[in-house]
Image: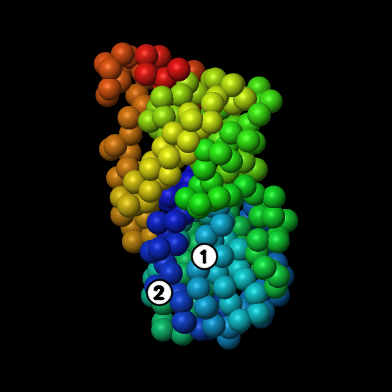
Amino acid sequence: MPELPEVETTRRGIEPHLTGRRIVRLAVRERRLRWPVPRGLETTVAGQRIHGVRRRAKYLLIELDTGSLILHLGMSGALRILPTATPPDKHDHLDLELDDGQCLRLTDPRRFGALLWTTRAPESHKLLRELGPEPLSDEFNGEYLHALSRGRRAAVKSFIMDSHVVVGVGNIYANEALFLAGIHPARAAGRISRQRYEQLAAAIKAVLEQSIRVGGTTLRDFTGSDGRPGYFRQSLRVYERAGRPCPVCGEAIRLKRIGQRSSYYCPHCQR
């Protein structure tokens, strides 16, 4: 699944092509996505101007004259900017046709993506209103994590992957951030000091910022909005490296299942 850096990379890739453009037509070839594309949305958005593209968690928010499109890539979705006349392939479900002859095309083989509409502030939508802070915001820091974690017995890895705690810290980035902070992924969230949470918050920011700079993590079902994969995977320190030496101490990286997810860690460096 595309994680926050992939979605932010996509946003930065498509935003210059969309902002200021007017929508000529929304072409819906497949309405049965994770949630059905609303009936009548084609009429609603036709003729409206695009004022910007924002991101909230893993949702892209395309701001129009009278509301916002809420777009999610799901498990395997990708967006491309193409000439409108480009023939669609089997899994090309939506085209947002623009007044410059280009279109924003959603490709989604598994159909777990979504295109929804709201006339209110997108942050008040039921899918977004209970989400935690953005990990790259000033609101997200060690003090916040420490206060929220008190009394929690859940593993710290599960804690930071909870979207009600903080958005966008997926499995890959949680593994990498915990390694950088020297925290064992199975340690109870409520048993970690404020100082160590300061280190963890800084590590989460560093890992996500690095990944965004290089275009996201290369995943089987995702390529960047310009068709190029990201290259952060080349810099992964522990993720999917079970049995290989720790890049710091040389101890073999171990694999453990935590919250039904694969967790990679160094038994020497992470406590």
Q: Residues within 10 Å of mark 2 (few under 14, many from 20)?
A: some
- Report x, y in % for residue 16: 39, 73
Whether residue 56 can be seen here: yes
- The vertical placement of 5 against 182, above or below, is below
- Report x, y in % for residue 240: 38, 27
Q: Which residue is mark 2?
A: 17
Which of 147/103 is in front?
A: 147
- Report x, y in % for residue 164: 65, 43
Q: Which residue is mark 1?
A: 54
Say which mark, if any, is on residue 94. none
- Report x, y in % for residue 31: 64, 62
Element on which disc 2 rests:
helix
Which of 85/9 is in front?
A: 9
- Give the mark nearer the N terminus: 1 vs 2: 2
Please give the name of the residue rendered at 57% of the width and 61% of the height, measured from the top-left corner.
71
Amino acid type at mark 2: His
